[in-house]
Image (spheres, rainbow, N blue to C red):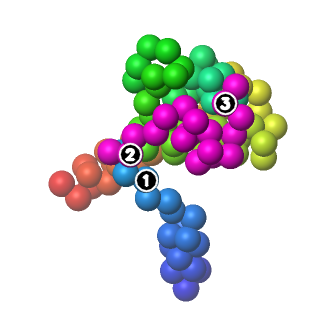
Amino acid sequence: MSEIRQAQVALLQCEVVEEEVRLSLADLGRACNAELALVQQLVEYGVIQPEGGEPQAWVFTGASLRRTRVALRLLHDLELNLPGAAVAVDLLDEIARLQRALRAAQHG
């Protein structure tokens, strides 16, 4: 019974973001309720990687939106600094990638 309850909670926390989503710097800031300067710092620390040269021309994907939201939660909830949040986001993505690979190996 507790496994079912845990699965339901996980589904409630799930957020579907399409990879094809294209966001400007301003759009990403609004979507995450973040100051543009903070979003630019996330770019500087490698948390997100925009397409385009100058900030006015930057375009972000759905993956950037997800990574930005995760980084902001780490910054605010756990009070990590930017370098720590950058490392944590990368590690969380690596864990997710390894879990997908393990599931594929077990079912494939």
Q: Are marks 2 and 1 in contact (CB under 8 Å)?
A: yes
Spatial CA distance of label 2 from label 1 is 8 Å
Q: Which residues are magenta?
A: 20-37
Dot 2: few (<14), some (14–19), or many (≥20) neighbours within 10 Å? Answer: few
Q: Residue furthest left?
A: 108
Instruction: Please report whichever mark, 3 or 1, sits nearer to the chain's N-terminal start.
Output: 1
Compared across the picture, whether 84 is left or right of 61 comes to: right
Q: Position of residue 32 (x, y in %)?
A: 63, 46
Q: Say whether residue 36 is magenta.
A: yes
Which residue corresponds to mark 2? Answer: 21
Spatial CA distance of label 3 from label 2 is 19 Å
Instruction: Please report whichever mark, 3 or 2, sits nearer to the chain's N-terminal start.
Output: 2
Name the kind of residue labelled 2 in the image.
Val
Name the kind of residue labelled 1 in the image.
Val
Q: Quadrant of residue 19?
A: top left
Q: Are marks 3 and 2 in contact (CB under 8 Å)?
A: no
Which residue corresponds to mark 1? Answer: 17
Q: Position of residue 55 (x, y in %)?
A: 53, 20
Does 97 sit above or below residue 38?
Answer: below
Residue plotted at (40% across, 23% down): 51
Q: Position of residue 7 (x, y in %)?
A: 51, 73
Dot 3: few (<14), some (14–19), or many (≥20) neighbours within 10 Å? Answer: some
Which residue corresponds to mark 3? Answer: 36
Viewer-proximal residue, 97 or 36?
Answer: 36
Q: Can residue 69 be seen in this snapshot?
A: yes
